[in-house]
Amino acid sequence: MGTAVIFGASGQDGHYLSRLLRSHGVQVVGTSRKDGEHAGDVSDFGFVESVIKRHHPDFVFHLAATSSARHSFLFENHQSISTGTLNILENVYRSCSSARVFLSGSALQFRNQGLPIDEDCEFEASSAYALARIHSTYAGRYYRAAFGLHVFVGYFFNHDSPMRSESHVNQAIAAAASRIAAGSDEVVTIGNASVRKEFNFAGDIVDAAWALVQQDKVYEAVIGCGETHTIREWAELCFSLVGLNLDDHLVVPEGFVAEYDVLVSKPTLIRSLGWKPTVGMQGLVEMMMGKE
């Protein structure tokens, strides 16, 4: 089945994608800034060039990113997402133009009006992170149109796994519930528990990315389950799983303004390729709390 290079292989998406590809007989070459078979920065043109020239991959996945949307991460996001995309696309164009390139996009790069988001919705540079994602997408479109490269973009909606760090709210809640059940006297702070979003499993999300690069009709697709739940519902499931009442351990700060009220996909297009999620919110809670 060939060779795949994954830039950003050490994160949760890279972990599950590597496992998926190997199950299909694909040789995986993982890169990351800190570890992996090739340690280096995707924003370094020479590093990307050396990896692609050495392996002449059949597939290239760009998953490297800084997940923070804060303005203070403006240049870090630009380097890993925007510059990284250009480095990958230019080197694929020069060295292995038949390779299939997957760029991870984000739900956060779309204008969110509280309605289901699909591929026809407009982009909006509402954050430094969204700005980098939009640039990456347009770079992909340029190389696809100008040079005929097989460039795919999957717009990932919220997804988690046991590999998430506690900087992500879903993992922070799950980990706190486990510690409290074990005797910790800490509390859980949730800025706005009424926010509605998707609760997808990272393994399902990368399975959709793999489905996308296997065909030639759809080049961009939103990837999500299309179902929302509140953060409170997630927290209640986490605490109930260990026999606790959420409200006994919950603090809601005053004056917190959420980034959005609801964020949901309309995944009709990716489902037309035969993909569908296999893990629901209950299953994801059990997985992340080690109760599966």
Image: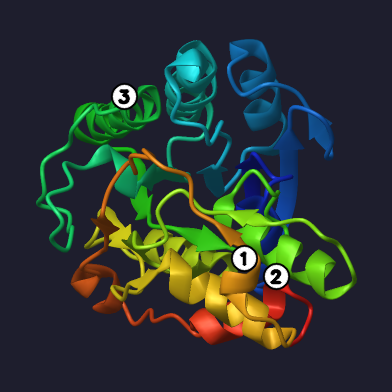
Residue with the mark numbered 1 = 1
Q: Are the residues flagged by discs 2 and 1 in contact, CB closer than 8 Å?
A: yes
For badge 3, the amino acid type reads Leu
Helix, strand, or loop for circle 3?
helix
Q: Which callout, 3 or 1, points to the residue nearer the camera? A: 3
The residue nearer to you, when weighing 101 against 248, is 248
Q: Amino acid at mark 1?
A: Met
First along the sequence among labels 3 and 1: 1
Residue 133: give its label. none
Say few, some or many: other residues with alpha carbon within 10 Å of mark 1 (under 14 / 14 to 19 / 20 or more). Answer: few
What separation in Å lies between label 3 and label 1 (alpha carbons)?
Answer: 35 Å
Q: Is 195 left or right of 246, judged from the image as shown?
A: left
**Image height of 127 relative to 274, above or below:** above
What element does badge 1 sit on? loop
SS for dot 2: loop
Q: What's the amino acid at mark 2?
A: Gly
Q: CA distance from mark 3 to mark 2?
A: 36 Å
Which corner quadrant of the image does residue 273 belong to?
bottom left
In-image side of 193 versus 31 (left or right): left
Of the image marks 2 and 1, the number of the one nearer the N terminus:
1
Lower position in the chain sequence, tag 3 or tag 2: 2
Q: How far across and down, in percent of the image, does residue 65 sit?
A: 55, 33
Q: Is residue 272 above or below residue 5?
A: below
Few, some or many C-alpha atoms within 10 Å of disc 3 (few <14, some 14-19, many ≥20)? many
